[in-house]
Image (spheres, helix red, strand yellow):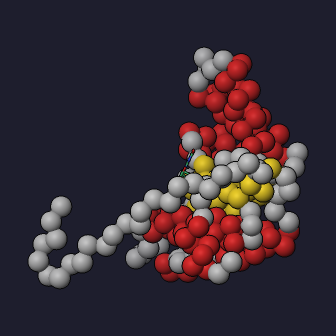
Amino acid sequence: MDALEALCTRTSIGALVEPGPTDAQLDAILRAASRAPDHGRMRPWRFLLIRGEARERFGEVLAEALRRADSSATDALLERERRKPLRAPAILVVAVTPQPRPGVPEIEQILAGGAAAQNVLLAAHAQGLGTMWRTGERAYDDHVKQALGLPTTAAIIGFIYLGTPAPDTRPKPVEPPAAAIEWTGAPAGP
Ligand SMILES: Cc1cc2nc3c(=O)[nH]c(=O)nc-3n(C[C@H](O)[C@H](O)[C@H](O)COP(=O)(O)O)c2cc1C
């Protein structure tokens, strides 16, 4: 698949099954992620891979975070949270801990992390893998950050679920592309 085809055909895939990415595929994914535009070449991103049984341990972390955030969470809700990481063979957590740097505001460091996350999606897709970029309340939760070894100042950009698209995955309808409004000097209007 060439680059433009990968860009124009990527979609999110919620139903992801085994096999997960091989080490060689992960290596290519991380090389692509590391080529994201990055103001000041700060390499602001950090990637954490959760796969195999570690997904169950991560599920415990998510459930505990929910329990701490909402003491009225029912057992059913806690169990649902616990099972979330099992929705795919692997999860790549993309995080950025912004650092003070003149000329590179925090938002630009976060955006660089977002660009790296997008490269993860595209590199996975180009290799025949499926992905789903998720966040949710647990991405903003200090208990989760601490369990992942991240400072509470870290921004979890995404939990990127990775795996093989389930056999019954149907192609999504293609949305019309966005049009660029050409600006020629006069106000372009709303
Ligand atoms: C920062 C970010 C966080 C997201 N978090 C979630 C999420 O928690 N749950 C979800 O269903 N979709 C989430 N999405 C959206 C999906 O990843 C996906 O882009 C969306 O469903 C549209 O599908 P498409 O990628 O096939 O166009 C998130 C997207 C971004 C960029």
In front: 166, or 20? 166
Where residue 89 appears, as percent x and y from the top left, is 81, 51
**In the rendered view of the protein, which quadrant contains the C terminus?**
bottom left
Where residue 141 appears, as percent x and y from the top left, is 59, 41
**In the rendered view of the protein, which quadrant contains the N terminus?**
bottom right
Where residue 83 appears, as percent x and y from the top left, is 76, 35
Q: How many marks?
A: 0
168 shown above or below 120: above
Where residue 123 appears, as percent x and y from the top left, is 68, 71
Indicate the quadrant where residue 35 lies. bottom right
Instruction: Give the left or right position of residue 172, taking residue 169 as reference.
Output: left
Instruction: Give the left or right position of residue 108, taking residue 164 as reference.
Output: left
109 shown above or below 145: below
Write the residue at 65% across / 81% down: 2
Instruction: Give the left or right position of residue 159, taking residue 165 as reference.
Output: left
Q: Is residue 88 visible in this depiction of the protein?
A: yes
Q: Is residue 48 visible in this depiction of the protein?
A: no
171 shown above or below 179: above
Write the residue at 62% across / 56% down: 171
Indicate the quadrant where residue 78 lies. top right
In front: 173, or 126? 173
Write the residue at 56% across / 39% down: 137
Write the residue at 84% across / 46% down: 54
